[in-house]
Image (spheres, rainbow, N blue to C red):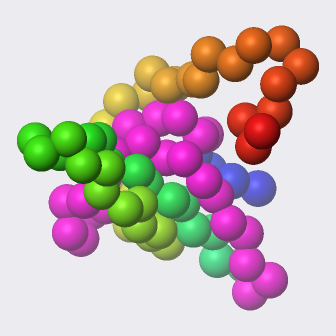
Amino acid sequence: MFKFPLGVQARDRVTGFAGIITSRTEHLTGCDYYGVQPPVNEKGEIPGALSFDEPRIEITDQTVVALDMPPNVSPAA
């Protein structure tokens, strides 16, 4: 069971890396990891997302960012 929802703002407690939680991974060993996607930088580039172990994650904004998807369209399409 995951502790944090997708789409909320989060920060890694160790490095300060921040962004939106866009993915979650549950490992067989019981570790839960969260993918954090930072915003576009000042050059207009999209930085790569990084994954962090659940205890390192701190939620900075509970507001959920959601995609505006048309009905019957998969985000993977």
Q: Which of the two residues, 16 or 72, is positioned nearer the viewer here?
A: 72
Residue 10 showing in the rendered view: no
Image coords of residue 6 (percent x, y): 59, 40
Indicate whether 37 appears above or below 39.
Answer: below
Q: Pick out the residue farthest to the bottom.
A: 29
Q: Which of the two residues, 70 or 16, is positioned nearer the viewer here?
A: 70
Image coords of residue 14 (percent x, y): 24, 70
Indicate whether 11 appears above or below 34.
Answer: above
Q: Which residue is drawn at 59% across and 23% down?
A: 67
Quarter of the rendering containing residue 5: top right
Q: Which residue is drawn at 41% across and 60% down?
A: 49
Left or right position of 62 against 46? right
Highlighted magenta segment, given as a residue range: 5-29
Image coords of residue 30 (percent x, y): 72, 78
Q: Which residue is drawn at 75% across and 13% down?
A: 70
Image coords of residue 38 (percent x, y): 32, 48
Quarter of the image that includes the N terminus: bottom right
Quarter of the rendering containing residue 60: top left
Q: Residue at x 57, y 23 (%)?
A: 66
Residue 9 showing in the rendered view: yes
Left or right position of 59 against 4? left
Indicate whether 76 appears above or below 66.
Answer: below
Q: Which of the two residues, 6 or 41, is positioned nearer the viewer here?
A: 41
Q: Pick out the residue farthest to the left.
A: 42
Left or right position of 21 against 39? right
Left or right position of 64 against 5? left
